[in-house]
Amino acid sequence: MIKVIDLTVFIYLLHRWFDWVYRESNGMGDSHRIDPWSSQQSTDYQRLTQKFGLESLDLSLIPDPNILHRRGIIFAHRDFDVILNSIKNKDNFGVLTGLMPSGRMHLGHSMVIEQVKWFQEHGGDVNVAVADLEALATRSKSLNEGRKTAIEEYIINYAALGLKPNSTKIYFQSKRPQVQRLAFTLGRKTNLSELESIYGFQGDTNLAHVQSPLIQAGDIMHPQLEEFGGLRPIVVPVGVDQDPHLRLTRGLASKTNWFNIKNRKNGGLTIALSIQEENAKILGVSPNGALLRETRNDIFEKIKKQISRLGFADILPNPKHGTIEIPGATPRDKHPLKMELLKLERNLGGMGLMPPCSTYHRFAVGMTGDKMSSSKPETTIFMDDSIEEMSKKVKRAHSGGQATVEEHRRLGGNCSKDVAFQYLEFFFETDDKELEEIRKNYSSGRILAGEMKQLCIDKATVWLNDLSEKRDEWSGKLDDFLANDSY
Ligand code: TRP
């Protein structure tokens, strides 16, 4: 009898193990998935970078970096070099971000706005999505509640933080049909299996929730529509929890593209036609799959003409295969080439969408030492916390100090554990020299844990008071920020 039970238990465990191995090897293990709707964020940034193929940020390439750049808080990106080039060449580019209109705005939310401000100062036009449809789908907030929260909690603080109204357009997902139409259109290029593997959606996931990442893809791509500024690079600064949306959106964009650029085997680049139902005839494929020679030759002439201004010496067209090889092209030619091909695609009737660029920031630690979350007020500082509330939270915050003063003087404090220090680093102490001085003195034990907290309280007091003053100045004037279709 005992042997029989052993065997069934054994087989059960074997099953579980196989299941686990299968999920892990498919990248479906929970530990490998990022859930953008959960407050449980992974902070293993190195693994996330590797797993999802993010690129590291090279500080030396960034013109007048802000504190988040300088302090390594923005740590990774996708195609950020495209944006840096636009900045350098004074070409147009856009910034898009979104806010979830639920809960109260806290320090963690301000990090994206710091980045948006930096892009704005460097020539980007700014679009902000109020994710009222997403809040309805995933947080059960009515559109009316969402609107109120967006304006009274978030937009007022964006203004107070120094976002400039002249190049900022804030819109509501529910009020912009172009976003919804684009979401619907892009939805043709994905399916339930893909959403299941990216987000873990299952049979009981409600369909509004299933649609929300497509709406977000619509948010991210729609500034490229002609009526919202046309073809230009769009950068999306986010916390790493939002990367699944960017992966989805980038994939969707490239699946719509009519012309792909690949690295050529023996150096150089290859342009390849991407034949799809909607473009087959235009690109020279008849309904029965036969090559329409004349049409194809025509298209190739158009491609050659379109890219001629890039001045490649050698172009090897193979109309039959649908490829054009450019042996002399270098990786630097990829982006200009892409832009020309997207323009051509638009002229031929395609959408001509460019995959979005993105940057990723680390999360500030919660004040209790674990995750920051607006549903746990003790873990963060809200934008409108009183000085008393803030002081109380800082005094109770997780400390990197030693157990006794003697020990602290001898061993020094631990900055990488000390919340007060990290809040100075992330938010309140903008002077790098001051911050290094504080780091040195804390690590050597000269500054005590209580003194560190007081330093943080002093700086945070100035910060919060300033913000509150600015909120007063902006109150009643927020219409300057809202797009025309917000009403
Ligand atoms: N999903 C985002 C959040 O939970 C909000 C959002 C909607 C967003 N659309 C966006 C963020 C586009 C960045 C880009 O906060």
Image: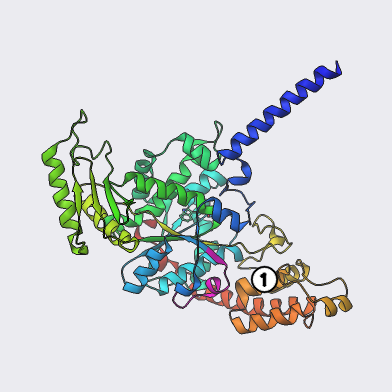
When asked about the image quadrant of residue 228, the answer is bottom left
Q: What residue do we see at 84% from left, 80% from top?
A: 409
As displayed, is residue 258 above or below residue 65? Answer: above
Residue denoted by label 1: 422
When asked about the image quadrant of residue 356, the answer is bottom left
As displayed, is residue 99 above or below residue 133? Answer: below
Q: Is 469 left or right of 453, judged from the image as shown?
A: left
Q: What residue do we see at 60% from left, 63% from top?
A: 108
When asked about the image quadrant of residue 297, the answer is top left
Q: Is residue 231 visible?
A: yes
Q: Position of residue 277 (x, y in %)?
A: 27, 35
As displayed, is residue 87 above or below residue 109? Answer: below
The residue furthest left is 294
Q: What residue do we see at 78% from left, 67% from top?
A: 396
The residue furthest top is 1
Q: Position of residue 65 (x, y in %)?
A: 49, 75
- Name the element at disc 1: helix
User: Does the beta carbon of the residue at mark 1 sit less than 8 Å from ligand 1?
Assistant: no
Q: Is residue 143 visible?
A: no
Nearer to us in this view, 324 or 408: 324
Q: Is 407 left or right of 29, judged from the image as shown?
A: right
Q: What residue do we see at 23% from left, 55% from top?
A: 343
Q: Is residue 73 magenta?
A: yes
Nearer to us in this view, 133 or 418: 418
Nearer to us in this view, 279 or 127: 279
Nearer to us in this view, 234 or 380: 234
Q: Is residue 294 magenta?
A: no
Q: Is 177 left or right of 203, judged from the image as shown?
A: left
Q: Which residues are magenta?
A: 62-75
Q: Position of residue 145 (x, y in %)?
A: 53, 52
Q: Amino acid at mark 1?
A: Gln
Q: Residues within 10 Å of mark 1 (few under 14, many from 20)?
A: many
